[in-house]
Amino acid sequence: MLKLSLPSAYGVATYPPGATFGPRLLQDHEFVWVLEGHAQYLSGSKLLELPPGTLLLCQAGSTDFFAWDPDHHTRHAYVHFQIEEVPASWLPAEGWPRMCAIDSSSILVPLFEHLLACVETASEEQIKAVLELMLTAFVTGQTTLRRSYQKWPRTLEQVMKQVHDTLEQNPAHPFTLKELARIANITPEYLCRLFKTHTGHPPLEWVRLVRLDRALVLVTRTNYRFSEISHLLGFASPFHFSRRFKSAYGFSPREVREQARSGKSIPLSRLVQVEF
């Protein structure tokens, strides 16, 4: 019987060219799905190359290190979980695959998308079932067809996609309300109503939370100094960044980094992005 915990951390991370993360001592298991860019993964003495479309399983108890693409931004999805019990018929974890290539024909694509989309709203039993299917598919190599879905109204998706695309090329870009409204060719007033109705936040507040979610990734999953993160993401100053970060997550950047490096639970992203 396979039995897993609920995810302790999950999301989609975007890294500037040349970012690194680690060394870290991993306290649980983690799936890492490379969506864009390349990466190198070092675990013990084993170095793995991770091209786009790679799904990696990082195992609990390992000390690892990531070096992200030096020439291009890198984007990946991730989820952390504990393994409490595995079927007696499975090989020991040492014999499991470490990585595999996945595309639209793999069940892991819709399962990963579905997990990130429903993790905050589904029941514990549903979330665990999806995660258990993911691990089973990874270990056994089973595949099936893919599904698709639309989460937001078309106009809202258009603005959100442009924000994400712009921030990936220029993380410090200073958006204005008029600029966001022009993207969808609607009035700022109508845009505000759309965002408030479907996300619960005004447009510029939503953009700020997107930046803070990106900051959370850089705080917990890279070796950047906090002043560098503040500058990269366009905050007015390190003090302003720290204050906004603590307001969003309840802890300072330093406290959250210490939690991450000691293997403790960290705050969850305010906005989980699932645009693949």
Image (cartoon, helix red, strand yellow):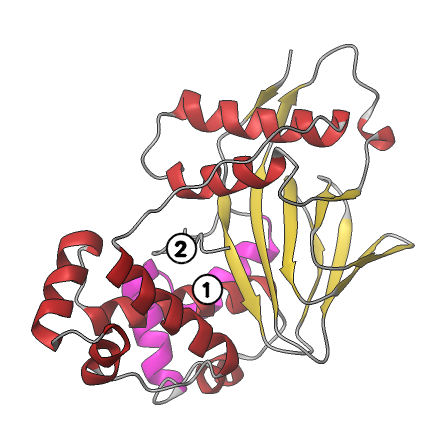
Identify the disc placed on residue 216: 1
Vertical placement of residue 41 versus 192, above or below? above
Query: How many other residues sit within 10 Å of disc 1, few (<14), some (14-19) or many (≥20)?
Result: many
Q: Is residue 209 visible?
A: no
Q: Main secondary structure of the magenta part?
A: helix
**Residue topped by disc 2:** 269
In this view of the protein, which residue sits in the foreground, 211 or 141? 141
Image position of 203 (left or right of 272): left
Give the CA distance from mark 1 to mark 2. Answer: 7 Å
The residue lying at 40 percent from left, 53 percent from top is 272
Task: Estimate the x, y position of residue 151 in percent, counting from the top left.
Answer: 32, 47
Tell me if label 1 and label 2 are in contact, CB under 8 Å: yes
The residue lying at 45 percent from left, 29 percent from top is 127
Task: Estimate the x, y position of residue 192 in percent, counting from the top left.
Answer: 13, 68
In this view of the protein, which residue sits in the foreground, 197 or 128? 197
In this view of the protein, which residue sits in the foreground, 116 or 230? 116
Q: Secondary structure at mark 1?
A: helix
Image position of 90 (left or right of 12): right
